[in-house]
Amino acid sequence: MTGDSRSEAFSLRRRPPGEKLLDHGFRHFTFALAAMVAVLLLAIFVTVFRGAWEAIGSFGLRFLTTSAWDPVNGNYGAFTAIYGTLVSSLLALLFAVPLGVGTAIFITEDLLPWSIRNVIGVMVELLAAIPSVVLGLWAIFVLEPAIRPFLQFLHNTFGWLPVFASVPQGPGMAPAILILVVMILPIITAISRDALNQVPIELRQGAYGVGTTRWGAILHIILPAAISAIMGGVMLALGRAMGETMAVTMIIGNSMTFSTSLLAPANTISSMLANQFGEADGIQVSALMYAALILMLLTFVVNILAQWIVKRLSLRY
């Protein structure tokens, strides 16, 4: 190629100034949008922190370890709500992860005809669209009466254990855990299904080519290849469970009396805020803001942990 032809080709590859200006403008615009998200998050944190400052100065770290919630005497401690938030979320995750991942495997793998798997997938997606207040009403009128005989059996048989020591009388921790399972199940299922669908077909074919069984390929090839994305969905579901408000508020009992029993009424930070913030006054408002700050920090820790787990699993698999 001669020098003239090379310079002509280079001139043809040169971009007009208008396109460059458009690219620069688009880059700055997207940066501004991302910065707005960061500024909004920081503004929320600062607002909650300022509202909680009075309670932080009055109660300090004792607020995290005491269960007293006495608006009359101005004595507050959020240990009961913190305990209820963590226990309900983690136990709901314990039940929802096998169900969600198993449902995703059932939908993505050729275990049944596509029409049946498609119907189940649509039903899972519709489950995510049900408002939480509707699920709360369903928990009150259907779920809790249906499981009360089984909870009574657990109390009669294993009542010597602290987790089953209370007599089930209605709303409590156990129904709240089950309604959280229903609420986070679509998240885990949808993300797990997408992760399994993204596994390269060559991995499946290679597994079958060396003589492995269907379940051998699923357990030893497909799931490890998708485990990082699945764990990201699991941690996202954990954050959703920790922050869920309406359905849990309607069925958990909203008791500030600490109990290790899963059959007794309990409370969570979100439920406590929803119940008391409208009528709070004085130092109680600051105490509720302190509890909200703790919930924000817990969800922040969950997100950091999720990123760390996903990165480690991505490097390993």
Image: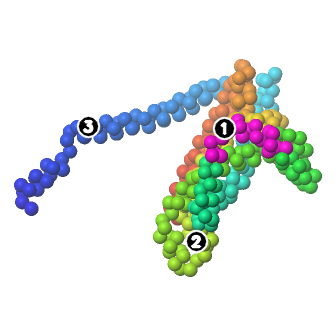
Instruction: Look at the numbered disc 2 and give the secondary structure of its residue.
Output: helix
Q: Nearer the viewer, residue 52 or 117?
A: 117
Q: Main secondary structure of the magenta part?
A: helix
Above or below, 247 relative to 209: above
Q: Is residue 210 visible?
A: yes
Q: Earlier in the sequence, mark 3 or mark 1?
A: 3
Residue at 58% across, 71% down:
217
Amino acid bearing label 1: Pro
Q: Earlier in the sequence, mark 2 or mark 1?
A: 1
Amino acid bearing label 3: Leu
Magenta span: 126-145
- Tell me the tag on residue 217: 2
- Tell me the tag on residue 120: none
Residue 177 lies left or right of residue 228; in this view the side is right
Q: Is residue 139 magenta?
A: yes
Q: Are marks 2 and 3 in contact (CB under 8 Å)?
A: no
- In the rendered image, residue 103, in percent from the top left (x then y), is placed at 65, 58
Q: Nearer the viewer, residue 18 or 158?
A: 18
- Residue located beneath label 3 in the image: 21
- Residue located beneath label 1 in the image: 131
Instruction: Look at the numbered disc 1 and give the secondary structure of its residue.
Output: loop
Q: How is the image coloured?
A: rainbow
Amino acid bearing label 2: Ala
- In the rendered image, residue 313, in percent from the top left (x then y), is placed at 55, 60
